[in-house]
Amino acid sequence: MTIPKLFLSAVVALAVGAAVAAFGGSGKVLSLLTQAVIYAVFAIGVGLLLRQNGMVSFGHALFFGTSGYAIGIILQMQLMPAEAAIVLTLIAMGLIAFLMGLVMVRVPGVAFGMLTLAVGQMAFLSASRSRGVTGGADGMNVDWPSTLFGAPVSVLVQPHTMFMVCWATLVVVMLVLALLLRSRFGSITEAVRDNEERARFIGIRTLAPRAAVYALSAVVVGLSGVLSALNTGFVSPENLHWSLSGVSLMMVVVGGYKVLWGPALGAVVYFLAKDILGDYANHWMAIFGVALITVIVFSPTGIAGALQRLVHGKKAAPAARASHGH
Amino acid sequence: MLTINLFNGLVYGALLIVMCSGLALIYGLRRVVNFAHGSLYMLGAYLGYSIAMRSNFWVALVAVPAIMAMLGVLLDRYGFRLLQDRDPLSVVLVTFGLLLIIEDFVQTVWGKSNLSVPAPAALSTSIDLFGTPVPAYRLAVIAVGAGVALGLTLWLRYSKVGLFVRAASTDPTTTAMQGVNTDALSAGVVGLGTALAGLAGVVSAPFLSLSPSMSSDVIIDSFVVVVVGGLGSLSGAFIAAMGLGMVQALGAVYLPNAAVLLPFMLMVGILIWKPSGFAGSRT
Amino acid sequence: MSNYVLQAEDVAIHYGGVKAVDGVALTLERGQIRGLIGPNGAGKSTVIDAITGRRRLTRGRVHLGGEDVSELGAVERRKRGLSRSFQRTSIFGQMKVRQQVELASYKMGVADSGADADAVLKELDLYALSNATAEDLGYGEQRRLDLALALVGRPTVLLLDEPMAGLSVKESLDLAQHLKALTSRWDVSVLLVEHDMDVVFGISDVVTVFELGRVIASGDPATVRADARVREAYLGSAA
């Protein structure tokens, strides 16, 4: 897609979102959609790491929960206005994640996954046990002030506005990432992902770009954590648990990680399925487990990949090739 | 007081030995980090519960590992074998999918509430250990752990099949070229690995209650053991398992917060400084 | 000493009890093509790895244009104009052909990286495939892409590790002649590891012969060919 087309798509997407917000029916439906959108942003962050670095993280819930906790604690201690808290949290998260990335991305393959799992669980355990600071296993409320960026919070948390805020965030995040990935930075990180050794032999210092992608994915996930804290007004250790990371990973893989919108599709499918399944919804774990296995075995590029093959027809035999490289 | 805590540490350590040796074996032969291992442990515990309720504990002790072994053979034959040319992360995600399926199955069949299994009558007594009374059952658990550790070590070292397993863990291609049926071997070893997970489950039931979260609780610990011990190294796993058991038990009493984080910090440290024990570098 | 664009002094690479390379000295003058030949396992590729920074030196020094680069990593050496291709094709599978070649040129600081990339692609007959994804190319095309990634960015010293591997006799000779003309035109000095004797003796100005991690002969092609030790070790009396 050319750049003008990208901007046009973004505008159209925003318009569609506005329409949904206005005519989307009951608060319940919009609430569900809002949750789906928040998870879509989460999944896009996780998917970014997989797509640009070829790395699988089982611990990105770390950033989802931490941003919520950070804001909650800042607001509770009344250190600064909420707007500043949000901006500061995200910036600090990016910087810290970059430093973490410098150390962590050197770890190859499955070991990296286990490392992220360990770090994420450490955060979970710490939050569960720090009753004084985080409210412990019960979680804590996030005391939002009466206005946020000029808008009254009581209006913001209405289903229609909340959905629009989250949807707009999703669209903007995707637009920014799309622009970033077609830049020099995108090329460099793709080269490092495809062939780290050759990348060095054409003059690319490979550590910083990969750490930067890790940091970027952390900020995106952190942003979804902020939205969640706004949406529910609450944050608990469950927001840091590895099972949440696992679910997000599932959305990424089932949706398809090769395209930017794949993980978002995965999130939507997840929520729709949970809703549609009705009676069977109790078995959503087994169903998603089967879906995950099916996708990996038959269409490693996910639903998005399958859709693309359907549309483009001639790109027919990538299933075999896709299994050889990310 | 100290004796009891040390003792409990040994008990938990023994349990981890049984479970983690299965994980290490599967990794050694198939280079797969089995994310579903904790769920298999849980499945074994719940199956043990049902069988023990219908007949008795001893039958469960034999039946469950047998059932889990068959499951393991199927898992290898129709899972790991077919996916062996794919990148390791794909296989790991498949085991994660398996984890979800097993969790759902357990919750569906047995429900979400906690269940308990009474210890068998023969072991429901107390024995005097250095002046402190300890449940005989827990002593038996330690014996099981020791037995598994000893048995595996001897088997790998001195039996012909053990030799094949060690060879196949080091170099599957050459071993296959030497005429060893590595597919049958892998199926057998994976079956053994899952059987061990199931055994750990059955054995744990009388002293840890059964709950749907038991797999989450234990999978992280088993990863810590296996990483700290050196992935694929059985003896390392044994030592690390005992160590972790001790740390958990003592720490729970004396330094709760630090003790809980220590294993993770160790795991993080090892993964960062020496991940070279791992397969699964980029495609 | 500093007349050489490239010099390796007493280079040794030992690992795990194996002495892959044991005391090798090499020089390369500006505009020269030096062929490296020897049986499999003689250490030729390892020497390339040592010179380019892919492997650590156990002993010895490497000088590039008079500067001692022995402590520098692969990235630094590349930025100083030392470029290499790979025996086992090493390209960026999911990226497009022109995209990756242009990126390589850009990283070398070439102002008009697009034009540089186009020029190299044309020379290697890959221009028509500019928008193809690398992993979709055929074997020969991928070998040429590997070469392109090394040629782009105006290198001063080029190390080629069996660039003809897998090509037919005619393709090999054609590529060899083409490379000779190209490197002469662009003032690039070349170290060439190859098994194909016709290629090596056809285009090299000087030849170095390896055996068991050591140099056993070095000089102009005719002299080396006639050397008794070389014949015995490698060429056989039919040469």
Image (cartoon, coloured by chain):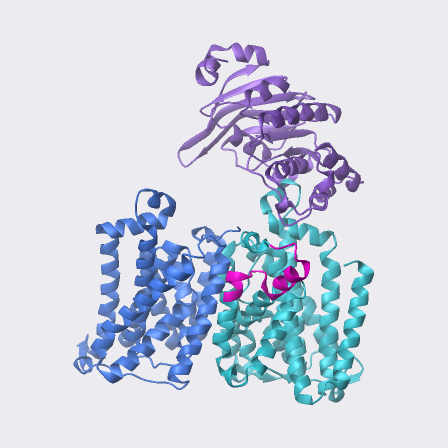
Chain colours: A cyan, B blue, C purple
The percent position of residue A151, horizontal first and vertical second, equals: 79, 83
Magenta region includes residue A288? no
- Name which quarter of the figure residue B195 lies in: bottom left
Q: Main secondary structure of the magenta part?
A: helix
Q: Quadrant of the C terminus of chain A?
A: bottom right
Above or below, B225 relative to C39: below
As drawn, the residue found furthest toward the front would be: A313
Residue A147 shows up from this direction? no
Relative side of C237 to C27, left or right: left
Relative side of A98 to A151, left or right: left
Q: Nearer the viewer, residue B117 or B273?
A: B117
Magenta region includes residue A312? yes
Above or below, B110 relative to B259: below
Above or below, C98 relative to C173: below
Q: Nearer the viewer, residue A280 or C84?
A: A280
- Name which quarter of the figure residue B49 lies in: bottom left
Give the total of numbered labels.
Answer: 0
The percent position of residue A128, horizontal first and vertical second, equals: 50, 78
Q: Which residue is at 30% across, 58% downward?
A: B188
The percent position of residue C166, horizontal first and vertical second, equals: 55, 32
The percent position of residue C109, horizontal first and vertical second, equals: 75, 40
Relative side of A4 to A262, left or right: right
Above or below, C219 relative to B178: above
- Name which quarter of the figure residue B145 lies in: bottom left
Q: Which residue is at 51% across, 55% downward?
A: A109
Residue B24 shows up from this direction? yes
Q: Quadrant of the N terminus of chain A?
A: bottom right
Q: Which residues are magenta?
A: A294-316
Q: Nearer the viewer, residue A138 or B160?
A: B160
